Every structure is written in C-alpha cells, then in structure tokens.
Amino acid sequence: MDMKVVKTEAEWRQQLSDIEFQVTRQAATERAFTGRYWDHHEHGIYTCVCCQTPLFESDAKFESGCGWPSYFKALNPAHVREIRDHSYGMTRIEIVCNICDAHLGHVFPDGPKPTGLRYCINSASLAFTPK
Ligand SMILES: [Zn+2]
C-alpha cells in the first residue's frame, strides 16, 4: 500500500496554481479545449500535479474529441480510486488520486478497445514527464 499524502488547504494553495487548486482540491472542471494536455502528443508519463504519483501514460492516451486528455486505462489501478458522483443530476464515476485524494476527472464506459473505458481527466490535475 502506498503512503497517503495529506496536506492542509493552505499548503495545497501555496503549492498549486489557482486552476490546479480549484480542480484537484475543489473538484472543479476546466473548460473543454483550454487545458494544457488535451492536444498533447509527446511520449511520457502523466503524474498527479499534487503528489507526483504516476497516473497515466501517453501509450494509453487517445483522441476522444471531448476537449480533455483521455486515456483508456490507468497506469497503475492502485493509484486511482473510483467514487460514485451524483452531482448535476447525473450518475457518473469520479476518479481521484488514491495517494492524495486529488480530483482528476471521470471515467465513462464509451472508450476504445481493449478496455472500453474513457478516463476523461482535467489537464490541471496532471503534470507531464517526457520519456
Ligand atoms: Zn495525487
């Protein structure tokens, strides 16, 4: 089991930009086609912007057309956690970082093979490390 990363709201505010804080710690959603990674094609690893845990890799990234970076699987299933989300009158599955509880985005059952899943993630939740 990985160690949990726990910080106060003030510590997260100091570490993160405004949009990163709003998305990861307050579960906001960045506007489609505005984030830094929806149209990003380099090879590498996407990590949690809060705790640097590896979350997704470029090999699992695909063009979803939705305006957010989309992946058909998580790099390590132990690093993400699913939470049922009933906000906005919809039932969706929220994805959070399992290490620091950062809000990442949602997972939908309309992705490509082999998983059929679409992890629709806010760019503001991610940092990128080239391979
Ligand atoms: Zn994290």
Image (cartoon, helix red, strand yellow):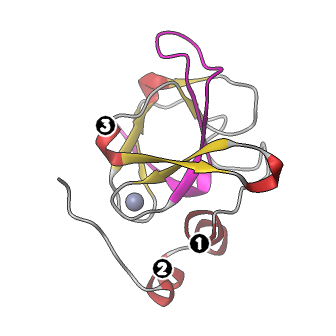
Asked if disc 1 is less than 8 Å from ligand 1, the answer is no
Q: Is residue 32 magenta?
A: no
Q: Position of residue 28 (x, y in %)?
A: 70, 62
In the picture of the structure, the residue carrying the numbered disc 3 is 76
Q: State the separation of the CA atoms marked 1 and 2.
A: 7 Å
Q: Quadrant of ligand 1?
A: bottom left
Q: Is residue 104 magenta?
A: yes
What residue occupies the far bottom of the structure in this picture? 10
Q: Is residue 56 left or right of residue 33?
A: left
Nearer mark to the viewer, of 1 and 3: 3
Which mark is first along the chain, 2 or 1?
Answer: 2
Residues in magenta, as a range: 103-131
Provide the secondary structure element on which disc 1 rests.
helix
Q: Position of residue 101 (x, y in %)?
A: 43, 63
Q: Is residue 89 left or right of residue 35?
A: right
Q: State the separation of the CA atoms marked 1 and 3.
A: 24 Å
> Is label 1 in contact with label 2 (beta carbons under 8 Å)?
yes
Provide the secondary structure element on which disc 3 rests.
loop
For label 3, the crowd category at 10 Å Cα-Cα, with few meaning under 14, some 14 to 19 and many 20 or more, is few
For label 2, the crowd category at 10 Å Cα-Cα, with few meaning under 14, some 14 to 19 and many 20 or more, is some
Against 20, residue 97 (above or below) is above
Against 109, residue 86 (above or below) is below
Q: Which mark is residue 21?
A: 1
In the picture of the structure, the residue carrying the numbered disc 2 is 12
Residue located at (17% from left, 53% from top): 1
Which mark is first along the chain, 3 or 1?
Answer: 1
